[in-house]
Structure formats: structure tokens, C-alpha cells
Amino acid sequence: MNNFQQQPRETINTQVGLNAFLTRMFGWMGASVLVSALTAYLMVASNVRLGSGGMLVALIAWFILPFVISGQSMKRPTTAIVGLMVYAVLTGAVVSMYAYVYTGAAMAGAFVSSAAVFLTMATIGLTTKRDLSRIGTQATAALIGLIVAMIINMFLRSSMIALIFSFIAVIIFAALTAWDTQKMQKMYLQYGDQVSMTGLAINGALQLYLDFVNLFLQLLQIFGIFGGSRD
């Protein structure tokens, strides 16, 4: 009888802990998006632009900082939180430069579209019974190949190829959103009582934030090609 009563209690406790973890993870991810949007808005409203040197430094830091945050998330969660917010501000500064290339309607459309795609795929990742590991691995491999192809197209400067690549990238990051969501849920269920929940939540928030930002940037390029550019 005691074992029968204990099992439901453990299940409830696990579900409560999982809900708290997911709330914290998506909360930090949402806060990061808000900080980026606010930073971009304030910079555009104040007409503050990064110079060529500042843009180069920002882009280098933009690529390096996620690795630093991920490495610190489990060791120093508080440091990782600060790093995530700094990265969100940095991303907002980079995104603000796009406001001088694309129209406000294009940026708003890309933001709403990326939010819709993100929420849909995150929900699928949370609710599906199917193991998405294989899809995630394939999407990661496809992303590496796509990055190489995009670099090559920087020299070819083909708008049609760029459009095709952007559509492919949206599909890839949509798949990664579902996979990362499911992966973090599984990681909590497997290691949640052995590691810092805050650190794990920050790690997940960073991954999902990167998925969202990349969805936004790719959709922005698509909107820009279809008449959303200021050129």
C-alpha cells in the first residue's frame, strides 16, 4: 500500500519540478528576447549606430560569448545569467543595424512569424512522444553544410540562392527548436536532482534564444527579398 501511494507522489513531485524548470527556462529565454528588442528599439530611436570597428568587435563577441555562457552555466549560474543578459544586449545592438536595411513592416513581420514558428515547434518538442534526437542530429549536420554554402554565396551574391538558403535555414532552426526543447526536458528528468536547476535552465534558455534569433534573422531576409528592403 505504501509503495502504491509513494509512486503517484513521486510522479507529482517530478512533474512539479519539471514545470518549475520549464517556467524558469522559458522565462529567461523570453527575458532575453525582450532585452534584445528593447536594446534595438532604443538604439534606433536614439540614432545610435555601430561603426565598422564596433560592428566587427560586436560580431566577434556575438559568436564567442555563447560558448562562454554555456561553459559557465553549470559552474557559475549567476555569472551565466549576467552573460546571457549581456549577450541579449549585444544581439539587440547587432539587430538594430538591420533597421537601416529593412523596413519596420519587414522587421515586425519577421518577429511575429518567428515567434509563431518558435511557439509551435517548442510546443511540439514538449508534447510529442517521438524521440527527436535523430531529427536534431540531421538538422545540426544540415546547418553546418548550409553555413558553408552561405559563405560561398557571399562571393556569388545570388539573391535567389540566398532566398532558398533562408527557407532551408528556417526549416532547420524550426527543427532545432523542437529538438532543443525536448532535449532540455529530458536532461532535467535525467539529471535535474544532480545539477543546478538554474544552470540547466540558463543553458536551455541560451539554446532556445539562439534558435529564435536565427529564425528571426532568416525570416527577415525572406521578408526583405520580397519587398521589405529599404534599397
Image (cartoon, grey):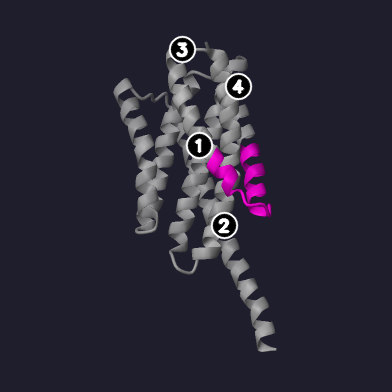
Query: Pointer 2: residues within 10 angstroms few (<14), some, or many (20+)?
Result: many
Q: Position of residue 227 (x, y in %)?
A: 61, 14
**Residue that protrudes farthest toward the bottom in the picture:** 1
Mark number for residue 185?
2
Q: Earlier in the sequence, mark 1 or mark 4?
A: 1
Q: Where is mark 4, residue-wise?
A: 223
Q: What kind of residue is marked 4?
A: Phe
Q: Would you place residue 75 above or below residue 28 in this image?
A: below
Q: Earlier in the sequence, mark 1 or mark 2?
A: 1
Rounded to the nearest whole Å, what is the CA distance between mark 1 and mark 2?
A: 22 Å
Q: Position of residue 166 (x, y in %)?
A: 56, 25
Mark number for residue 141?
1
Q: Earlier in the sequence, mark 4 or mark 2?
A: 2
Q: Residue at x 64, y 37 (%)?
A: 117
Helix, strand, or loop for circle 2? helix
Q: Residue at x 44, y 19 (%)?
A: 152
- Residue 230 makes an appearance in the image: no
Look at the image and tell me in which quarter the N terminus lies: bottom right
